[in-house]
């Protein structure tokens, strides 16, 4: 079965080989304080850095999930006020995390399927952290990188964090224009769930230390100061998902050999094919009307004549599983993941079926 679901999704095609090798080499049994595992962490970080062009002075640390990183970001980077752009379920949950942690969490919200016009934003002067969702998994809305850079230009005094959960490593993000970004591995990286990756700069460490010094809690074993202290030695504070870290390093190495330009070009091709197919179909309609905001990695279509489950079941007969809509769109939409592991041939077959 080909899983074009937006997470968990199809495993990257080299994972089976690397998994067998990991078991043979006892990766799951070695000490997480051993030199062997330090080398695994160092390799994984170096491959992420190369693949995503992460500057050397940015830290790369590991958590249990991207959902955990929402909490760690709010605890460590917000003393009082955060500001959230909300246009779907996951950007909304990021905001709700800040509310639950008793912060003054402002938000600006638009209807589902829409993006944000920078001229319309009203960001309070007291904001410490701007929380951006570069790719809203629930709706297939993407935030242009140029808008992120414009926000940095307009608000140089505020920290900026970027949710890249369902788009990394596709966006060619200039990390020097942001302070923090994060993703999880069960989407574009084609790995089993259970690992979050958080990229952050020195400003984030300084902010977290200042909040600690003020007497406020920034968390426990996964606060920034502890994560950074350990990662400088290629270690983690606790026994981590060692297999996940190993596999991530191997898959990133494979992607680097393939070339990020090739991956981006293939993603663009599959995206153009799928949006064109939806636009030509009598059964589907592109959900995100403004092309500027259409995600390349999570394509969402309204189902016109039947329930979404009708088409999902039809596609399964041809060994293709697509995702249903999220939340309120479960019965009226389909979501099609367009990740590096998804072949052009699979997309061409799906396009033929949709026609």
Image: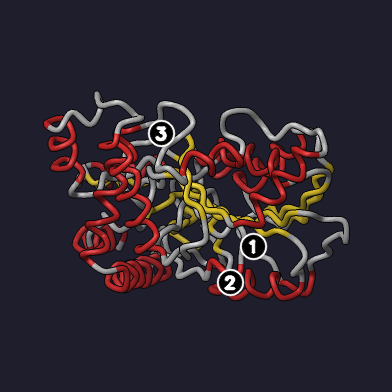
> Crowdedness of circle 1 by 10 Å Cα count: few (<14), some, many (20+)?
many
Q: Which of the pair 102/28 is nearer the observer? A: 28
Residue under the point 82% across and 62% down: 123
Earlier-in-chain disc, 1 versus 2: 1
- Element type at mark 1: loop
- Element type at mark 3: loop
Q: In which quadrant of the rendered view does residue 260 lie? A: bottom left
Which numbered circle lies on residue 312?
none
Residue under the point 37% across and 45% down: 5
The mark tally for this picture is 3
- Element type at mark 2: loop
Residue at which label 2 appears = 290
Question: Residue 3, image x and y in percent?
Answer: 29, 45
Residue under the point 34% across and 48% down: 42
Real-space CA distance between mark 3 and mark 2, rounded to the nearest whole angstrom: 34 Å
Task: Check if mark 1's residue and mark 2's residue have beta carbons within 8 Å.
Answer: yes
Residue at which label 1 appears = 114
Which numbered circle lies on residue 194?
3
Left or right, 224 with reference to 31: right
Real-space CA distance between mark 3 and mark 1, rounded to the nearest whole angstrom: 30 Å
Quick one: which residue is furthest to the right in this view? 125
Q: Which of the pair 224/80 is nearer the observer? A: 224
Question: Residue 211, image x and y in percent?
Answer: 77, 42
Q: In which quadrant of the rendered view does residue 90 lie? A: top right
Question: Residue 192, image x and y in percent?
Answer: 32, 37
Earlier-in-chain disc, 3 versus 2: 3
């Amino acid at each position: 079965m080909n899983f074009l679901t937006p997470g968990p999704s199809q495993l990257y095609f080299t994972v089976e080989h690397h998994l067998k090798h990991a078991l043979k080499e006892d990766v799951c049994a070695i000490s997480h304080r051993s030199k062997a595992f330090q080398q695994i962490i160092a390799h994984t970080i170096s491959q992420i850095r190369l693949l995503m062009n992460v500057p050397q002075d940015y830290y790369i640390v590991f958590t249990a999930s991207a959902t955990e990183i929402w909490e760690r970001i709010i605890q460590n980077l917000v003393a009082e006020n955060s500001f959230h752009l909300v246009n779907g379920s996951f950007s909304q949950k990021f905001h709700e995390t800040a509310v639950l942690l008793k912060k003054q969490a402002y938000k600006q919200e638009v209807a589902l399927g829409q993006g944000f016009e920078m001229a319309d934003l009203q960001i309070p002067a007291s904001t410490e952290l701007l929380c951006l969702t570069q790719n809203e998994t629930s709706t297939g809305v993407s935030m242009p990188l140029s808008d992120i850079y414009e926000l940095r230009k307009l608000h140089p005094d505020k920290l900026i964090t970027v949710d890249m959960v369902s788009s990394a490593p596709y966006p060619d993000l200039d990390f020097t224009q942001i302070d923090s970004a994060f993703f999880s591995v069960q989407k574009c990286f084609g790995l089993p769930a259970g690992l979050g990756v958080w990229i952050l700069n020195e400003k984030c460490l300084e902010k977290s230390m200042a909040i600690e010094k003020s007497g406020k809690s920034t968390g426990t074993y996964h606060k920034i100061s502890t994560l950074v202290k350990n990662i400088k030695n290629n270690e983690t504070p606790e026994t981590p998902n060692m297999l996940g870290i190993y596999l991530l390093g191997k898959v990133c190495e494979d992607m680097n050999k393939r070339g990020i330009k090739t991956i981006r070009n293939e993603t663009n091709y599959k995206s153009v094919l799928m949006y064109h197919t939806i636009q030509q179909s009598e059964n589907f309609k592109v959900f995100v009307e403004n092309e500027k905001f259409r995600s390349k990695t999570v394509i969402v279509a309204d189902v016109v004549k039947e329930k979404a489950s009708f088409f999902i079941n039809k596609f399964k007969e041809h060994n293709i599983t697509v995702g249903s809509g999220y939340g309120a769109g479960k019965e009226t939409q389909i979501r099609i993941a367009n990740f590096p592991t998804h072949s052009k041939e699979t997309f061409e077959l799906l396009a033929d079926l949709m026609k």
